[in-house]
Image (cartoon, rainbow, N blue to C red):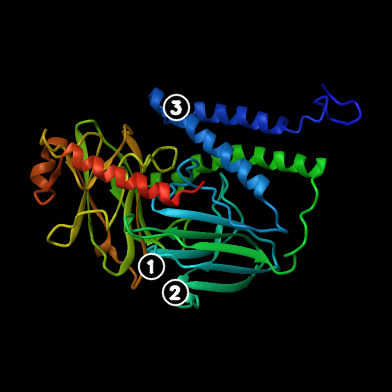
């Protein structure tokens, strides 16, 4: 029963109205996506919408410029922006001119990078990278602990930290924190109707804007390239400035496969390839093999890693149908692709990049004689290892 002595207990405040409207609009955007071909595509879209809602609520309600902290908005339950299956993402929101102290302990991951972004990703433009560096520029003690001070420059909006794993079986995460030197020790502001109204409105705008943004973004980059091709490694468009990447998109028939050949780069601590969906998000990398790092992949005697992208297992051997370097399309006849190189000791040239060949699935065994087939049991062991690693590091 409503308490007549407390305003709003009759439901008249209706603070969640913008959120409900945004969810309904998000559903309309998802249902009308032009690349939906099957019911499975639509179901994946609804799952994607749940991630957009989750991220919007987290960022709106965890957002406090007076009490900054690192939030983890992107993970296996909230995929976006062709998120890297090998990465943990941490975002902290900044106020210009304010001094911050960042502390942490370096884990054993292949890379730990920091990037300050200006502006935001929208359906019209990408955010701007103002600064990017990795932990090699930090002073660390014998235990890997570090601390640095940063004063947010004009235009700075977000500090993004990426912890990237190459060997999922052995590498462990560290920890990181951020604080404002001028507000530490002060109590949080009390909740008010105006504050919560604003938070629900911010969450509502985030839902629809993020959907529109990631619908538009791949058409500036991945889908601007010819289908079934991959670019020469360059600085990542709209992403981590210290990373090199090769991008593209694929379209394959059920009886076709794409063979991606790329030299193993010993001058990069991290090198990997992934498959993404038309939602411009990672596909299931926990219970399917939709990504591989150079630590997980097999390298041929000539120093080249050769990956097979296909819907069906490509070995041609019924007793051992899988290949170690198989990338599952998980029912997606079309999708996005990206190769990444991080923590480089040198810049990359065209000779370091991938080549692509689309072939009949039945021809794969003769084209890739060095890739040994895997049985059902052996492949299941690989998937189990992926599940264990994701469980260890994906804390959200």
Image point (25%, 40%), residue name:
380
Marks 1/2: CA distance? Answer: 9 Å
Q: Residue at x 54, y 30 (%)?
A: 29
Residue 118 image-quadrant placement: bottom right
Asked whether residue 231 appears in the rendered view, the answer is no
Residue, disc 1: 343
Identify the mark nearer the N-term, 1 or 3: 3
- Disc 2: which residue: 136
Quadrant containing the N terminus in the rendered view: top right
Q: How many marks?
A: 3
Q: x, y (%) of residue 67?
A: 70, 58
Asked if residue 101 lies left or right of residue 15, the reply is: left
Q: Quadrant of residue 160?
A: bottom right
- Relative image position of residue 65 (x, y in whole percent): 70, 57
> Which secondary structure, mark 3?
helix
In contact (CB < 8 Å): disc 1 and disc 2: yes
Mark with earlier residue (1, 2): 2
């Amino acid at each position: 029963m409503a308490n007549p002595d407390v305003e709003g207990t009759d439901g008249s405040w209706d603070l969640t109205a913008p959120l409900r409207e945004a969810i309904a609009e998000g559903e309309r955007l998802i249902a009308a996506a032009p690349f939906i071909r099957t019911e499975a595509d639509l179901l994946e879209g609804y799952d994607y919408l749940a991630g957009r809602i989750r991220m919007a609520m987290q960022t709106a309600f965890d957002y406090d410029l007076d009490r900054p902290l690192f939030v983890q908005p992107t993970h296996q339950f909230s995929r976006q922006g062709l998120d890297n299956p090998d990465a943990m993402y941490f975002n902290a929101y900044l106020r210009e001119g304010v001094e911050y102290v960042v502390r942490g302990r370096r884990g054993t991951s292949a890379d730990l990078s920091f990037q300050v972004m200006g502006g935001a990703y929208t359906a019209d433009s990408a955010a701007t990278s103002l600064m990017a560096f990795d932990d090699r520029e930090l002073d660390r003690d014998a235990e890997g602990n570090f601390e640095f001070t940063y004063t947010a420059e004009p235009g700075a909006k977000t500090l993004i930290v990426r912890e990237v794993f190459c060997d999922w079986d052995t590498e462990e995460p560290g920890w990181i924190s951020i604080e404002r030197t001028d507000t530490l020790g002060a109590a949080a502001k009390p909740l008010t109707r105006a504050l919560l109204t604003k938070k629900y409105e911010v969450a509502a705008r985030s839902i629809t804007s993020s959907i529109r943004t990631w619908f538009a973004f791949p058409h500036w980059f991945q889908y601007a390239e010819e289908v079934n091709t991959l670019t020469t490694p360059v600085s990542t468009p709209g992403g981590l400035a210290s990373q090199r990447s090769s991008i593209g998109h694929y379209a394959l028939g059920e009886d076709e496969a794409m063979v991606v050949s790329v030299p193993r780069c010993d001058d990069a601590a991290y090198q990997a390839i992934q498959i993404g969906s038309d939602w411009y998000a990672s596909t299931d990398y926990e219970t399917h093999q939709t990504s591989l790092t150079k630590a997980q992949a097999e390298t041929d005697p000539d120093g080249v890693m050769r990956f097979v992208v296909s819907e069906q297992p490509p070995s041609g051997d019924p007793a051992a149908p899988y290949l170690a370097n198989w990338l599952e399309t998980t029912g997606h006849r079309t999708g996005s692709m990206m190769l990444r190189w991080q923590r480089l000791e040198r810049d990359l040239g065209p000779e370091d990049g991938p080549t692509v060949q689309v072939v009949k699935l039945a021809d794969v065994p003769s084209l890739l004689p060095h890739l040994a087939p895997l049985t059902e049991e052996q492949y299941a062991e690989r998937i189990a290892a992926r599940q264990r690693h994701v469980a260890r590091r994906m804390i959200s």
